[in-house]
Image (spheres, grey):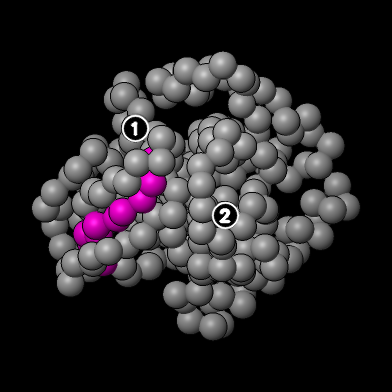
Amino acid sequence: MREINRGTAGGNISDLLQKALRALIGTGHGAGQQHHSYDYLFHGHHSNPTRPGFKPSVPVARAAGLAYMTPMTLRPILIHPDPRLKKVCDAVPDLSDELRTLANDMLETMYDAPGIGLAAPQIGMTRRLIVMDCVKEEGEAPQPMIMFNPEIILKSDDLNVYEEGCLSIPDQYAEVTRPAEVRVRWLDMNGNEQERDFDGLWATCVQHEIDHLNGVLFIDYLKPLKRQMITRKMQKLKRERARA
Ligand SMILES: [Zn+2]
């Protein structure tokens, strides 16, 4: 989990990780291009309001080593632009069963998408809650993480560039530069404070997800023209889906 000293700058991830991500993303991207897709990887079915979108889907959670008594629920993912994606989320004051259920649902929704991270506002809940699992290598044990009130308390001076995507901005990618390593503090499912250093893909992912809690999307790091172009594409996509 704690990956230390991955290189600085330039998105120099391991071949294994690249391979895993290519497998995750599928075909259509040229060699040498790396599409690291945080909460990305959208499968159109989420957008269909008539879909039995609330199907219980326990097997993935079981595979992830999560055994819960109640079946989990897939939640529809909001697509940009949406005012709920621009809100600063509220801190979680006390953990409750309701919040734990929400966290489990988010994890399940993320795995189903499939993605490697998801923030509560993406399913319309303005709570400071994110889930992640950046393990994508075939056969490797999943590492689901649930973080309430996550906070970045330390950032490295070293930077890393990854091509990011977002489940709320399907099929759009762009390079974003962020600190290569971060220290994060959060509350776990038991309300215990945790602290850990992240680097590589995990570091970028956790920053991307925490940004969501502050109403910030990865496209906010892009030049206005590029951002507007993506937003227009998403508006068009939403119109098409509304008609479908
Ligand atoms: Zn995102």
Q: In the picture, residue 12 is in which quadrant? A: bottom left
What residue would you read off at disc 2? 127
Residue at 61% across / 20% down in the picture? Answer: 70
Boundaries of the magenta span? 179-188
> Alpha carbon of mark 2 to alpha carbon of mark 1: how far?
22 Å
Which x, y percent locates residue 61?
49, 23
| In-image side of 72 versus 194 (left or right) | right
Q: Is residue 68 covered in magenta?
A: no
Which x, y percent locates residue 17?
27, 41
Q: Secondary structure at mark 1?
A: loop
Residue at 51% across / 47% down in the picture? Answer: 94
The kind of secondary structure the magenta stretch mainly shows is strand
Q: Quadrant of the N terminus?
A: top left
Numbered circle sitting on residue 28: none
Q: Is residue 222 visible?
A: yes
The answer to which of 18 and 59 lies nearer the viewer is 59
Vertical position of residue 10 compared to residue 189: above or below: below
The answer to which of 195 and 238 lies nearer the viewer is 195
Q: Amino acid at mark 2?
A: Arg
| In-image side of 15 versus 85 (left or right) | left
Q: In the picture, residue 64 is in which quadrant? A: top left
Q: Secondary structure at mark 2?
A: loop
Numbered circle sitting on residue 143: 1
Residue at 67% across / 53% down in the picture? Answer: 124
Q: Residues within 10 Å of mark 2 (few under 14, many from 20)?
A: many
Q: Residues within 10 Å of mark 1 (few under 14, many from 20)?
A: some
Vertical position of residue 70 compared to residue 29: above or below: above
